[in-house]
Protein backbone atom coordinates (compact mmCIF):
# COMPACT_ATOMS: atom_id res chain seq x y z
CA UNK A 1 0.00 0.00 0.00
CA UNK A 2 2.66 2.45 1.05
CA UNK A 3 4.65 1.60 -2.05
CA UNK A 4 2.07 2.79 -4.58
CA UNK A 5 3.51 5.46 -6.85
CA UNK A 6 1.84 8.53 -5.40
CA UNK A 7 2.41 7.55 -1.80
CA UNK A 8 5.91 6.18 -2.16
CA UNK A 9 8.08 8.70 -0.40
CA UNK A 10 7.57 10.52 2.85
CA UNK A 11 7.99 13.86 1.11
CA UNK A 12 5.58 13.00 -1.72
CA UNK A 13 3.00 12.21 0.95
CA UNK A 14 3.65 15.59 2.53
CA UNK A 15 3.07 17.36 -0.77
CA UNK A 16 -0.25 15.59 -1.29
CA UNK A 17 -1.30 16.33 2.27
CA UNK A 18 -0.52 20.01 1.82
CA UNK A 19 -2.10 20.39 -1.64
CA UNK A 20 -5.32 18.64 -0.65
CA UNK A 21 -5.41 20.51 2.66
CA UNK A 22 -5.05 23.89 1.00
CA UNK A 23 -7.62 22.99 -1.63
CA UNK A 24 -10.00 22.11 1.19
CA UNK A 25 -9.32 25.55 2.70
CA UNK A 26 -10.49 27.10 -0.57
CA UNK A 27 -13.53 24.86 -0.50
CA UNK A 28 -14.28 26.03 3.05
CA UNK A 29 -14.16 29.67 2.00
CA UNK A 30 -16.57 29.03 -0.89
CA UNK A 31 -18.93 26.90 1.18
CA UNK A 32 -18.97 29.55 3.90
CA UNK A 33 -19.87 32.32 1.46
CA UNK A 34 -22.95 30.31 0.45
CA UNK A 35 -23.95 29.36 3.98
CA UNK A 36 -23.79 32.93 5.20
CA UNK A 37 -26.98 33.57 3.21
CA UNK A 38 -28.77 31.62 5.92
CA UNK A 39 -28.16 34.55 8.26
CA UNK A 40 -30.47 36.76 6.17
CA UNK A 41 -34.05 36.29 7.46
CA UNK A 42 -36.61 34.76 5.03
CA UNK A 43 -33.96 34.23 2.40
CA UNK A 44 -35.37 30.98 1.00
CA UNK A 45 -35.27 32.04 -2.65
CA UNK A 46 -31.65 33.22 -2.67
CA UNK A 47 -30.44 30.25 -0.68
CA UNK A 48 -32.26 27.69 -2.80
CA UNK A 49 -31.02 29.35 -5.96
CA UNK A 50 -27.52 28.98 -4.56
CA UNK A 51 -28.16 25.33 -3.66
CA UNK A 52 -29.46 24.61 -7.17
CA UNK A 53 -26.45 26.31 -8.71
CA UNK A 54 -24.12 24.25 -6.53
CA UNK A 55 -25.73 20.95 -7.56
CA UNK A 56 -26.09 21.61 -11.29
CA UNK A 57 -23.47 24.05 -12.59
CA UNK A 58 -20.82 22.08 -14.55
CA UNK A 59 -17.85 24.12 -13.29
CA UNK A 60 -19.05 23.70 -9.72
CA UNK A 61 -19.47 19.98 -10.39
CA UNK A 62 -15.83 19.67 -11.35
CA UNK A 63 -14.87 21.53 -8.18
CA UNK A 64 -17.11 19.37 -6.04
CA UNK A 65 -15.61 16.15 -7.43
CA UNK A 66 -12.17 17.58 -6.70
CA UNK A 67 -13.40 18.28 -3.18
CA UNK A 68 -14.66 14.71 -2.64
CA UNK A 69 -11.38 13.32 -3.93
CA UNK A 70 -9.38 15.73 -1.79
CA UNK A 71 -11.23 14.79 1.37
CA UNK A 72 -10.80 11.08 0.68
CA UNK A 73 -7.16 11.39 -0.28
CA UNK A 74 -6.35 13.76 2.58
CA UNK A 75 -8.00 11.46 5.11
CA UNK A 76 -6.43 8.24 3.76
CA UNK A 77 -2.99 9.83 3.43
CA UNK A 78 -3.38 11.35 6.90
CA UNK A 79 -4.24 8.00 8.47
CA UNK A 80 -1.36 6.34 6.62
CA UNK A 81 1.09 8.97 7.86
CA UNK A 82 -0.19 8.67 11.40
CA UNK A 83 0.07 4.88 11.31
CA UNK A 84 3.63 4.96 9.97
CA UNK A 85 4.63 7.61 12.47
CA UNK A 86 3.31 5.53 15.34
CA UNK A 87 5.48 2.64 14.10
CA UNK A 88 8.56 4.86 13.98
CA UNK A 89 8.70 4.85 17.80
CA UNK A 90 7.66 1.38 19.00
CA UNK A 91 8.77 2.04 22.60
CA UNK A 92 7.67 5.35 24.04
CA UNK A 93 9.14 7.52 26.78
CA UNK A 94 8.33 7.05 30.46
CA UNK A 95 8.38 10.81 30.83
CA UNK A 96 7.91 13.29 28.05
CA UNK A 97 7.18 16.98 27.98
CA UNK A 98 5.80 17.71 24.51
CA UNK A 99 4.19 21.03 25.38
CA UNK A 100 7.71 22.42 25.91
CA UNK A 101 8.37 22.39 22.19
CA UNK A 102 5.15 22.03 20.17
CA UNK A 103 1.53 23.19 20.08
CA UNK A 104 -1.51 21.12 21.01
CA UNK A 105 -2.88 21.39 17.48
CA UNK A 106 0.32 20.23 15.82
CA UNK A 107 0.40 17.10 17.99
CA UNK A 108 -3.25 16.17 17.45
CA UNK A 109 -3.82 16.64 13.74
CA UNK A 110 -5.06 13.08 13.27
CA UNK A 111 -7.53 13.29 16.15
CA UNK A 112 -8.81 16.69 15.03
CA UNK A 113 -8.98 15.50 11.43
CA UNK A 114 -10.95 12.43 12.47
CA UNK A 115 -13.50 14.59 14.28
CA UNK A 116 -13.78 16.73 11.15
CA UNK A 117 -14.19 13.58 9.03
CA UNK A 118 -17.00 12.25 11.23
CA UNK A 119 -18.62 15.65 11.00
CA UNK A 120 -18.29 15.77 7.20
CA UNK A 121 -19.91 12.34 6.87
CA UNK A 122 -22.88 13.18 9.12
CA UNK A 123 -23.18 16.58 7.48
CA UNK A 124 -23.37 14.96 4.05
CA UNK A 125 -25.97 12.47 5.22
CA UNK A 126 -28.09 15.26 6.66
CA UNK A 127 -27.91 17.78 3.81
CA UNK A 128 -25.95 16.68 0.77
CA UNK A 129 -27.62 13.26 0.43
CA UNK A 130 -31.08 14.74 0.95
CA UNK A 131 -30.45 17.34 -1.72
CA UNK A 132 -29.14 14.74 -4.17
CA UNK A 133 -31.14 11.59 -3.54
CA UNK A 134 -34.08 12.10 -1.19
CA UNK A 135 -37.35 11.39 -3.01
CA UNK A 136 -39.30 13.26 -0.36
CA UNK A 137 -37.24 16.43 -0.57
CA UNK A 138 -39.76 19.29 -0.24
CA UNK A 139 -40.06 21.86 -2.99
CA UNK A 140 -39.96 25.55 -2.30
CA UNK A 141 -43.29 27.35 -1.97
CA UNK A 142 -44.01 31.01 -1.44
CA UNK A 143 -47.02 32.46 0.26
CA UNK A 144 -48.35 35.36 -1.77
CA UNK A 145 -51.18 37.69 -0.85
CA UNK A 146 -53.21 37.88 -4.09
CA UNK A 147 -56.07 39.82 -2.61
CA UNK A 148 -55.89 41.53 0.80
CA UNK A 149 -56.18 38.92 3.53
CA UNK A 150 -56.15 36.08 0.99
CA UNK A 151 -52.84 34.27 1.11
CA UNK A 152 -52.12 31.48 -1.32
CA UNK A 153 -49.16 29.09 -1.57
CA UNK A 154 -47.29 28.85 -4.86
CA UNK A 155 -44.51 26.65 -6.14
CA UNK A 156 -41.72 28.81 -7.52
CA UNK A 157 -40.09 28.10 -10.88
CA UNK A 158 -36.47 28.75 -11.64
CA UNK A 159 -37.32 31.39 -14.25
CA UNK A 160 -38.49 34.83 -13.16
CA UNK A 161 -42.23 35.15 -12.62
CA UNK A 162 -43.05 31.42 -12.58
CA UNK A 163 -45.61 30.71 -9.86
CA UNK A 164 -47.87 27.66 -9.74
CA UNK A 165 -50.68 27.30 -7.16
CA UNK A 166 -49.89 24.40 -4.89
CA UNK A 167 -53.34 22.88 -5.14
CA UNK A 168 -53.01 22.74 -8.93
CA UNK A 169 -49.97 20.46 -8.89
CA UNK A 170 -50.28 16.70 -8.84
CA UNK A 171 -47.47 15.05 -6.90
CA UNK A 172 -46.82 11.33 -7.11
CA UNK A 173 -49.40 8.78 -8.24
CA UNK A 174 -53.00 9.89 -8.57
CA UNK A 175 -54.94 7.66 -6.25
CA UNK A 176 -57.80 10.03 -5.65
CA UNK A 177 -58.37 10.79 -9.32
CA UNK A 178 -62.03 9.94 -9.11
CA UNK A 179 -62.77 12.15 -6.18
CA UNK A 180 -61.24 15.34 -7.47
CA UNK A 181 -61.16 17.35 -10.60
CA UNK A 182 -57.93 16.63 -12.55
CA UNK A 183 -55.14 19.04 -11.66
CA UNK A 184 -53.53 21.44 -14.09
CA UNK A 185 -49.88 20.43 -13.50
CA UNK A 186 -48.00 17.30 -12.59
CA UNK A 187 -44.55 16.75 -11.18
CA UNK A 188 -42.03 14.55 -13.01
CA UNK A 189 -38.56 13.45 -11.87
CA UNK A 190 -38.77 15.22 -8.51
CA UNK A 191 -38.46 18.81 -9.76
CA UNK A 192 -39.80 19.07 -13.32
CA UNK A 193 -43.26 20.57 -13.65
CA UNK A 194 -45.35 19.37 -16.63
CA UNK A 195 -48.62 20.54 -17.98
CA UNK A 196 -50.92 17.64 -17.12
CA UNK A 197 -52.97 17.43 -20.34
CA UNK A 198 -50.46 18.66 -22.92
CA UNK A 199 -47.66 16.70 -21.24
CA UNK A 200 -45.08 19.43 -21.92
CA UNK A 201 -42.58 20.74 -19.44
CA UNK A 202 -43.37 24.20 -18.16
CA UNK A 203 -40.84 24.81 -15.40
CA UNK A 204 -38.17 23.52 -13.04
CA UNK A 205 -38.96 23.91 -9.35
CA UNK A 206 -36.56 24.56 -6.48
CA UNK A 207 -35.76 21.95 -3.88
CA UNK A 208 -36.29 23.58 -0.50
CA UNK A 209 -32.93 23.06 1.20
CA UNK A 210 -33.58 26.23 3.15
CA UNK A 211 -36.59 24.68 4.85
CA UNK A 212 -34.72 21.43 5.56
CA UNK A 213 -31.84 23.34 7.12
CA UNK A 214 -34.02 25.49 9.36
CA UNK A 215 -36.09 22.50 10.43
CA UNK A 216 -32.93 20.51 11.19
CA UNK A 217 -31.49 22.99 13.68
CA UNK A 218 -34.90 23.91 15.09
CA UNK A 219 -36.02 20.32 15.61
CA UNK A 220 -37.88 20.27 18.93
CA UNK A 221 -36.17 17.14 20.16
CA UNK A 222 -32.68 17.12 18.59
CA UNK A 223 -32.14 20.64 17.26
CA UNK A 224 -30.10 21.69 20.27
CA UNK A 225 -27.85 18.61 20.04
CA UNK A 226 -27.32 19.11 16.30
CA UNK A 227 -26.38 22.70 17.00
CA UNK A 228 -23.96 21.78 19.78
CA UNK A 229 -22.41 19.03 17.66
CA UNK A 230 -21.92 21.45 14.79
CA UNK A 231 -20.26 24.02 17.02
CA UNK A 232 -17.93 21.40 18.56
CA UNK A 233 -16.92 20.18 15.11
CA UNK A 234 -16.06 23.76 14.18
CA UNK A 235 -13.78 23.95 17.23
CA UNK A 236 -11.97 20.85 15.96
CA UNK A 237 -11.72 22.38 12.48
CA UNK A 238 -10.35 25.60 13.96
CA UNK A 239 -7.62 23.77 15.85
CA UNK A 240 -6.86 21.64 12.75
CA UNK A 241 -6.36 24.79 10.71
CA UNK A 242 -4.49 26.62 13.48
CA UNK A 243 -1.58 24.32 12.75
CA UNK A 244 -2.54 23.05 9.30
CA UNK A 245 -2.72 26.24 7.27
CA UNK A 246 0.85 27.39 7.82
CA UNK A 247 2.08 23.80 7.97
CA UNK A 248 0.96 23.24 4.39
CA UNK A 249 3.23 26.03 3.16
CA UNK A 250 6.18 24.54 5.02
CA UNK A 251 5.41 21.14 3.46
CA UNK A 252 5.37 22.69 0.01
CA UNK A 253 8.83 24.06 0.71
CA UNK A 254 7.64 27.63 1.07
CA UNK A 255 9.47 28.98 4.08
CA UNK A 256 11.25 32.29 4.09
CA UNK A 257 11.99 34.75 6.87
CA UNK A 258 10.10 37.40 4.90
CA UNK A 259 6.84 35.62 4.08
CA UNK A 260 6.47 32.94 6.75
CA UNK A 261 5.36 35.37 9.50
CA UNK A 262 2.68 36.72 7.14
CA UNK A 263 1.52 33.19 6.22
CA UNK A 264 1.36 32.26 9.90
CA UNK A 265 -0.72 35.34 10.66
CA UNK A 266 -3.15 34.67 7.80
CA UNK A 267 -3.39 31.02 8.85
CA UNK A 268 -4.34 31.89 12.41
CA UNK A 269 -6.87 34.48 11.24
CA UNK A 270 -8.37 31.89 8.84
CA UNK A 271 -8.46 29.25 11.59
CA UNK A 272 -10.43 31.54 13.88
CA UNK A 273 -12.70 33.44 11.49
CA UNK A 274 -13.88 30.67 9.15
CA UNK A 275 -15.00 28.11 11.80
CA UNK A 276 -16.47 30.95 13.88
CA UNK A 277 -18.64 32.20 11.01
CA UNK A 278 -19.71 28.62 10.19
CA UNK A 279 -20.67 28.06 13.83
CA UNK A 280 -22.68 31.27 14.14
CA UNK A 281 -25.14 30.05 11.49
CA UNK A 282 -26.68 27.05 13.34
CA UNK A 283 -26.57 29.04 16.59
CA UNK A 284 -28.50 31.84 14.92
CA UNK A 285 -31.01 29.45 13.36
CA UNK A 286 -31.55 27.50 16.55
CA UNK A 287 -31.93 30.45 18.88
CA UNK A 288 -34.21 32.53 16.65
CA UNK A 289 -36.96 29.97 16.16
CA UNK B 1 33.90 33.31 44.24
CA UNK B 2 32.16 30.12 43.46
CA UNK B 3 28.39 29.82 43.77
CA UNK B 4 28.59 26.05 43.50
CA UNK B 5 26.89 23.98 46.14
CA UNK B 6 26.04 20.35 46.56
CA UNK B 7 22.60 18.87 45.92
CA UNK B 8 21.01 15.48 46.52
CA UNK B 9 18.97 14.07 43.64
CA UNK B 10 16.79 11.10 42.75
CA UNK B 11 17.43 9.45 39.41
CA UNK B 12 15.11 7.27 37.34
CA UNK B 13 17.29 5.68 34.70
CA UNK B 14 16.47 3.29 31.85
CA UNK B 15 18.51 0.12 32.34
CA UNK B 16 18.69 -2.53 29.63
CA UNK B 17 21.32 -5.26 29.55
CA UNK B 18 21.44 -5.61 25.78
CA UNK B 19 19.42 -5.15 22.61
CA UNK B 20 17.23 -8.17 23.40
CA UNK B 21 16.58 -7.36 27.04
CA UNK B 22 13.19 -5.82 27.84
CA UNK B 23 14.66 -3.16 30.10
CA UNK B 24 13.01 -0.85 32.59
CA UNK B 25 13.37 2.22 34.78
CA UNK B 26 15.57 1.81 37.89
CA UNK B 27 15.64 4.30 40.79
CA UNK B 28 18.89 5.65 42.23
CA UNK B 29 19.72 8.19 44.89
CA UNK B 30 22.80 10.32 44.41
CA UNK B 31 24.03 12.66 47.13
CA UNK B 32 26.53 15.50 47.13
CA UNK B 33 26.40 16.36 43.46
CA UNK B 34 28.21 19.64 42.82
CA UNK B 35 26.05 22.10 40.85
CA UNK B 36 29.25 23.04 39.00
CA UNK B 37 29.52 19.57 37.48
CA UNK B 38 28.18 18.75 34.07
CA UNK B 39 25.34 16.29 33.58
CA UNK B 40 27.74 13.64 32.32
CA UNK B 41 30.06 14.19 35.30
CA UNK B 42 27.04 13.57 37.50
CA UNK B 43 26.56 10.23 35.69
CA UNK B 44 30.28 9.49 36.16
CA UNK B 45 29.76 10.08 39.88
CA UNK B 46 26.80 7.71 39.88
CA UNK B 47 28.84 5.07 38.07
CA UNK B 48 31.61 5.34 40.65
CA UNK B 49 29.03 4.77 43.35
CA UNK B 50 27.66 1.76 41.45
CA UNK B 51 31.12 0.29 40.87
CA UNK B 52 32.00 0.73 44.55
CA UNK B 53 28.82 -1.17 45.37
CA UNK B 54 29.82 -3.91 42.90
CA UNK B 55 26.97 -3.01 40.54
CA UNK B 56 26.98 -2.62 36.77
CA UNK B 57 27.65 1.04 35.79
CA UNK B 58 25.19 2.83 33.51
CA UNK B 59 26.29 2.84 29.88
CA UNK B 60 25.90 6.19 28.09
CA UNK B 61 27.40 7.77 24.98
CA UNK B 62 29.87 10.65 25.03
CA UNK B 63 33.07 11.73 23.38
CA UNK B 64 34.21 15.35 23.11
CA UNK B 65 32.21 16.64 26.09
CA UNK B 66 32.42 20.11 24.62
CA UNK B 67 29.31 20.15 22.48
CA UNK B 68 30.83 19.58 19.06
CA UNK B 69 30.95 15.85 18.27
CA UNK B 70 27.29 14.85 18.57
CA UNK B 71 28.04 11.67 20.46
CA UNK B 72 26.19 12.39 23.71
CA UNK B 73 22.43 11.94 23.76
CA UNK B 74 19.89 11.26 26.57
CA UNK B 75 16.24 12.16 27.02
CA UNK B 76 16.23 14.08 30.30
CA UNK B 77 12.96 14.82 32.10
CA UNK B 78 11.06 14.45 28.86
CA UNK B 79 13.35 16.55 26.71
CA UNK B 80 16.17 15.68 24.33
CA UNK B 81 19.50 16.92 25.75
CA UNK B 82 17.63 18.13 28.84
CA UNK B 83 15.75 21.28 29.78
CA UNK B 84 18.11 23.85 28.31
CA UNK B 85 17.75 24.85 24.66
CA UNK B 86 20.75 25.15 22.38
CA UNK B 87 22.89 22.75 24.40
CA UNK B 88 24.00 19.16 24.15
CA UNK B 89 23.78 16.94 27.22
CA UNK B 90 27.52 17.28 27.81
CA UNK B 91 27.07 21.05 28.04
CA UNK B 92 24.17 20.81 30.46
CA UNK B 93 25.13 21.60 34.05
CA UNK B 94 23.75 20.47 37.34
CA UNK B 95 23.06 24.07 38.36
CA UNK B 96 19.93 23.70 36.23
CA UNK B 97 18.58 21.29 38.86
CA UNK B 98 17.47 21.77 42.43
CA UNK B 99 18.10 19.85 45.62
CA UNK B 100 15.66 16.94 45.89
CA UNK B 101 14.81 16.91 42.16
CA UNK B 102 13.78 13.68 40.48
CA UNK B 103 15.40 13.31 37.06
CA UNK B 104 14.25 10.84 34.40
CA UNK B 105 17.01 9.70 32.07
CA UNK B 106 16.01 7.65 29.02
CA UNK B 107 17.67 6.74 25.73
CA UNK B 108 16.73 8.50 22.46
CA UNK B 109 13.74 6.49 21.23
CA UNK B 110 13.26 5.59 17.60
CA UNK B 111 12.77 2.42 15.60
CA UNK B 112 15.85 3.47 13.65
CA UNK B 113 17.89 4.02 16.85
CA UNK B 114 17.81 0.59 18.56
CA UNK B 115 19.07 0.48 22.14
CA UNK B 116 22.46 -1.21 22.42
CA UNK B 117 22.70 -1.05 26.20
CA UNK B 118 21.13 1.15 28.90
CA UNK B 119 21.25 4.67 27.43
CA UNK B 120 23.40 3.85 24.42
CA UNK B 121 21.59 3.74 21.08
CA UNK B 122 22.84 2.74 17.65
CA UNK B 123 22.65 5.81 15.41
CA UNK B 124 24.36 4.21 12.41
CA UNK B 125 21.14 4.77 10.45
CA UNK B 126 22.32 8.40 10.25
CA UNK B 127 25.64 7.21 8.82
CA UNK B 128 23.84 5.19 6.16
CA UNK B 129 21.75 8.24 5.18
CA UNK B 130 24.94 10.27 4.94
CA UNK B 131 26.60 7.56 2.84
CA UNK B 132 23.62 7.54 0.49
CA UNK B 133 24.40 11.05 -0.72
CA UNK B 134 25.77 13.40 1.91
CA UNK B 135 29.03 14.14 0.10
CA UNK B 136 30.53 15.82 -2.94
CA UNK B 137 32.30 13.53 -5.40
CA UNK B 138 35.79 14.86 -6.04
CA UNK B 139 38.24 13.55 -8.58
CA UNK B 140 41.48 13.15 -6.63
CA UNK B 141 43.69 12.69 -9.71
CA UNK B 142 46.03 15.51 -8.81
CA UNK B 143 44.15 18.35 -10.45
CA UNK B 144 41.81 19.05 -7.54
CA UNK B 145 40.54 22.62 -7.55
CA UNK B 146 41.04 24.74 -4.48
CA UNK B 147 37.64 25.23 -2.82
CA UNK B 148 38.17 28.97 -2.52
CA UNK B 149 38.66 29.29 -6.28
CA UNK B 150 34.88 28.98 -6.71
CA UNK B 151 33.10 32.14 -5.61
CA UNK B 152 30.11 31.61 -3.31
CA UNK B 153 27.62 34.38 -2.50
CA UNK B 154 27.99 35.38 1.15
CA UNK B 155 24.33 34.72 1.95
CA UNK B 156 24.50 31.17 0.54
CA UNK B 157 27.78 30.51 2.30
CA UNK B 158 26.27 31.61 5.63
CA UNK B 159 23.19 29.43 5.18
CA UNK B 160 25.28 26.43 4.13
CA UNK B 161 27.52 26.96 7.13
CA UNK B 162 24.55 27.14 9.48
CA UNK B 163 23.18 23.89 8.04
CA UNK B 164 26.60 22.29 8.32
CA UNK B 165 26.56 23.02 12.06
CA UNK B 166 24.43 19.86 12.49
CA UNK B 167 26.43 17.40 14.59
CA UNK B 168 24.21 14.40 13.80
CA UNK B 169 23.24 13.84 17.42
CA UNK B 170 19.69 12.65 16.66
CA UNK B 171 17.92 14.89 19.18
CA UNK B 172 15.56 15.96 16.40
CA UNK B 173 14.45 12.35 15.93
CA UNK B 174 14.26 11.72 19.66
CA UNK B 175 12.03 14.69 20.35
CA UNK B 176 9.79 14.41 17.29
CA UNK B 177 6.45 12.79 18.06
CA UNK B 178 6.73 11.12 14.65
CA UNK B 179 10.34 10.00 15.07
CA UNK B 180 11.14 11.93 11.90
CA UNK B 181 14.71 12.60 10.80
CA UNK B 182 13.82 15.39 8.42
CA UNK B 183 15.69 18.14 10.30
CA UNK B 184 18.91 16.13 10.11
CA UNK B 185 18.41 15.16 6.47
CA UNK B 186 17.21 18.67 5.62
CA UNK B 187 20.40 20.12 7.10
CA UNK B 188 22.62 17.67 5.23
CA UNK B 189 20.81 18.20 1.93
CA UNK B 190 20.88 21.99 2.34
CA UNK B 191 24.51 22.23 3.29
CA UNK B 192 25.47 20.92 -0.16
CA UNK B 193 22.56 22.19 -2.25
CA UNK B 194 23.43 25.78 -1.36
CA UNK B 195 26.99 25.54 -2.66
CA UNK B 196 28.13 25.41 -6.29
CA UNK B 197 30.23 22.31 -5.57
CA UNK B 198 27.18 20.49 -4.24
CA UNK B 199 24.66 21.61 -6.86
CA UNK B 200 26.04 19.20 -9.46
CA UNK B 201 24.77 16.12 -7.61
CA UNK B 202 21.86 17.83 -5.88
CA UNK B 203 19.08 15.82 -7.56
CA UNK B 204 20.46 12.32 -6.89
CA UNK B 205 21.59 13.37 -3.43
CA UNK B 206 18.17 14.41 -2.17
CA UNK B 207 16.45 11.39 -3.71
CA UNK B 208 18.95 8.90 -2.36
CA UNK B 209 19.10 10.41 1.11
CA UNK B 210 15.31 10.63 1.41
CA UNK B 211 14.94 7.04 0.20
CA UNK B 212 17.47 5.84 2.76
CA UNK B 213 15.73 7.88 5.47
CA UNK B 214 12.42 6.19 4.65
CA UNK B 215 14.01 2.74 4.50
CA UNK B 216 15.54 3.17 7.94
CA UNK B 217 12.04 3.51 9.37
CA UNK B 218 12.04 7.17 10.42
CA UNK B 219 8.61 8.79 10.59
CA UNK B 220 7.07 11.54 8.47
CA UNK B 221 7.39 15.18 9.44
CA UNK B 222 4.15 16.92 10.38
CA UNK B 223 5.80 20.28 11.04
CA UNK B 224 5.29 20.33 14.80
CA UNK B 225 8.57 22.26 15.03
CA UNK B 226 9.78 20.38 18.12
CA UNK B 227 13.09 19.45 16.43
CA UNK B 228 14.02 23.05 15.74
CA UNK B 229 13.49 23.95 19.40
CA UNK B 230 15.43 20.99 20.80
CA UNK B 231 18.27 20.98 18.27
CA UNK B 232 21.46 21.91 20.14
CA UNK B 233 22.79 23.61 17.02
CA UNK B 234 19.73 25.70 16.18
CA UNK B 235 19.17 24.06 12.79
CA UNK B 236 16.17 25.86 11.25
CA UNK B 237 13.00 24.39 9.77
CA UNK B 238 13.89 26.32 6.62
CA UNK B 239 16.22 23.42 5.88
CA UNK B 240 13.29 20.98 5.77
CA UNK B 241 11.46 23.31 3.41
CA UNK B 242 14.56 23.50 1.23
CA UNK B 243 14.84 19.69 1.20
CA UNK B 244 11.18 19.44 0.15
CA UNK B 245 11.81 21.94 -2.67
CA UNK B 246 14.92 20.06 -3.75
CA UNK B 247 13.01 16.79 -3.68
CA UNK B 248 10.21 18.21 -5.83
CA UNK B 249 12.71 19.66 -8.30
CA UNK B 250 14.49 16.33 -8.51
CA UNK B 251 11.25 14.37 -8.98
CA UNK B 252 9.68 16.49 -11.71
C1 LIG C 1 -12.28 20.64 5.47
C2 LIG C 1 -11.52 19.81 6.01
C3 LIG C 1 -10.00 19.88 6.17
C4 LIG C 1 -9.11 20.88 5.91
C5 LIG C 1 -9.38 22.26 5.37
C6 LIG C 1 -7.79 20.36 6.25
C7 LIG C 1 -6.62 21.07 6.11
C8 LIG C 1 -5.38 20.58 6.44
C9 LIG C 1 -4.14 21.24 6.19
C10 LIG C 1 -3.98 22.58 5.50
C11 LIG C 1 -3.13 20.46 6.68
C12 LIG C 1 -1.64 20.73 6.66
C13 LIG C 1 -0.94 19.91 5.62
C14 LIG C 1 0.52 19.87 5.79
O1 LIG C 1 1.03 20.01 6.89
O2 LIG C 1 1.21 19.67 4.81
C15 LIG C 1 -3.74 19.29 7.24
C16 LIG C 1 -3.04 18.26 7.85
C17 LIG C 1 -3.63 17.10 8.31
N1 LIG C 1 -4.95 16.72 8.15
FE1 LIG C 1 -6.42 17.91 7.45
N2 LIG C 1 -7.90 19.08 6.70
C18 LIG C 1 -9.25 18.74 6.66
C19 LIG C 1 -9.81 17.54 7.00
C20 LIG C 1 -9.10 16.44 7.47
C21 LIG C 1 -9.67 15.14 7.65
C22 LIG C 1 -11.11 14.75 7.34
C23 LIG C 1 -8.69 14.35 8.13
C24 LIG C 1 -8.92 12.91 8.42
C25 LIG C 1 -8.36 12.18 9.21
C26 LIG C 1 -7.48 15.15 8.26
C27 LIG C 1 -6.25 14.72 8.73
C28 LIG C 1 -5.09 15.46 8.71
C29 LIG C 1 -3.82 15.03 9.26
C30 LIG C 1 -3.54 13.69 9.95
C31 LIG C 1 -2.90 16.06 9.01
C32 LIG C 1 -1.45 16.10 9.44
C33 LIG C 1 -0.57 15.49 8.42
C34 LIG C 1 0.63 16.31 8.10
O3 LIG C 1 0.87 17.35 8.71
O4 LIG C 1 1.34 15.90 7.22
N3 LIG C 1 -7.77 16.42 7.82
N4 LIG C 1 -5.12 19.38 7.07
S1 LIG D 1 19.54 18.66 13.20
FE1 LIG D 1 20.14 19.29 15.29
S2 LIG D 1 19.14 17.76 16.59
FE2 LIG D 1 19.14 16.90 14.54
S3 LIG D 1 20.98 15.68 14.40
FE3 LIG D 1 21.54 17.72 13.63
S4 LIG D 1 22.31 18.80 15.43
FE4 LIG D 1 21.22 17.01 16.22
S1 LIG E 1 29.94 14.58 23.93
FE1 LIG E 1 30.46 15.58 22.05
S2 LIG E 1 28.71 16.81 21.77
FE2 LIG E 1 28.33 16.00 23.74
Image: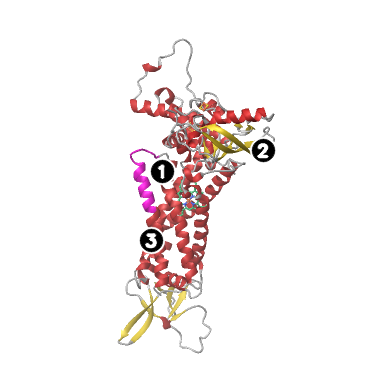
Foreground pick, A194 / B8: B8
Question: Quick check: A36 left or right of B227?
Answer: left
What's the distance in space between the residues labelled 3 and 2, CA to CA? 52 Å
| Quadrant assignment, res A161 | bottom left
Foreground pick, A105 / A199: A105
Viewer-side label of 3, 1: 3
Q: Position of residue A17 (x, y in %)?
A: 48, 46
Whether residue A262 is in magenta: the answer is yes
Which label was assigned to residue A277? 3
Which label was assigned to residue A40? none
Mark 1 residue element: helix
Question: Quick check: A226 left or right of B151?
Answer: right
Location of mark 1 (residue): A249
| Range of magenta residues | A254-270
Q: Position of residue B40 (x, y in %)?
A: 55, 29
Q: Where is residue A110 in the image (x, y as percent from the top left)?
A: 52, 50
**A173 relative to B80, above or below:** below
Amino acid sequence: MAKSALLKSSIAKKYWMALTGLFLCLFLAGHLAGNLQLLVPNNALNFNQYALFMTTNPAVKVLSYLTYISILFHAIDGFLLTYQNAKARPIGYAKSNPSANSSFSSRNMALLGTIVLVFIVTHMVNFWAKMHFDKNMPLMTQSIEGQPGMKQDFYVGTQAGQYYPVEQVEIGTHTDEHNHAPKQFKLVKKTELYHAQANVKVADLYKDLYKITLAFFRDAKYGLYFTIGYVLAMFALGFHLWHGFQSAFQSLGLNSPKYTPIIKFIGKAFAVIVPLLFAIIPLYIHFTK
Amino acid sequence: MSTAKNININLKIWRQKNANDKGGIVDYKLDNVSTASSFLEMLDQLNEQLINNKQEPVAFDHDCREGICGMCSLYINGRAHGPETGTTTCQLHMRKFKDGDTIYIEPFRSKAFPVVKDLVVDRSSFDRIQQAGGFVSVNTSGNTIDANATPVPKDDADKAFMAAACIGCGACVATCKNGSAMLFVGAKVSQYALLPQGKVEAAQRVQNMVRQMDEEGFGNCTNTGACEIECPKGISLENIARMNREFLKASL
